[in-house]
Image: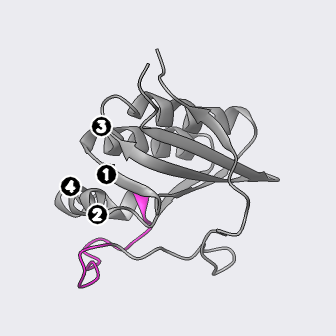
Amino acid sequence: MPLPQLTVYRHVRRHRALITLAGEIDLETAPLVRAALQRCPGDGIRTIDVDLSPVTFCDCSGLNVFLHAAQMTTEAGGTLRLHHPPRTLSLILDLTGSGALLLGLPVGYPPSPHGDVPAVPDPATGHRPHRHVPLVPVLSGDVQ
């Protein structure tokens, strides 16, 4: 069995979760991301911050998972925001105009000169998601 290409870390505080993804998000690993994000509303989580800073690659299958999760979270009365997307995802977000939905940016918001989209502060606190929490994998490997 090959080593997992993606690891999911989850830190929950009350009705808010910080989901940190590490590795590659593609057709093979997208079900793992979907499973992690679908658990949140069932666990009473209404605010989901997804830290993508350790992600090295994300294709359109990852975008599809994030859009679906954002829709489900919104329908449940919550919010989902992506933070620190990798360059590949930043380009896809820019091309599809999905940055307004997933990053909380105004439509037409320009990316930084390096081509990445800056992290958006949480509207409630004005702070970016915390990165000082210890990372303990909750999901890893293949999803059937």
Front position in the image: 101 or 29: 29
- Distance from disc 3 to disc 1, alpha carbons, whole Å, reads 11 Å
Say whether residue 90 is left or right of residue 42: left
Q: Which residue is denoted by mark 4 in the rendering?
A: 96
Q: Earlier in the sequence, mark 3 or mark 2?
A: 3
The label number, if any, that marks residue 61 in the structure image: 3
The label number, if any, that marks residue 100 in the structure image: none
Front position in the image: 69 or 136: 136
Q: Is residue 72 above or below residue 98?
A: above
The x and y percentages for residue 49 are: 58, 58
Crowd rating for badge 3 (residues with CA inside 10 Å; few <14, some 14–19, many 20+): some
Q: Which residue is denoted by mark 2 in the rendering?
A: 90
- Distance from disc 4 to disc 3, alpha carbons, whole Å, reads 13 Å
Query: What residue is drawn where x is 56% and y is 39%?
Result: 37
Query: What residue is drawn where x is 63% and y is 47%?
Result: 9
Q: Earlier in the sequence, mark 4 or mark 2?
A: 2
Amino acid type, mark 4: Thr
Q: Is residue 96 above or below residue 30?
A: below
User: To which quarter of the image does residue 44 belong?
Assistant: top right
**Is label 2 in a helix, a strand or a loop?**
helix
Amino acid type, mark 2: Ser
Q: Which residue is denoted by mark 1 in the rendering?
A: 57
Residues in magenta? 102-116
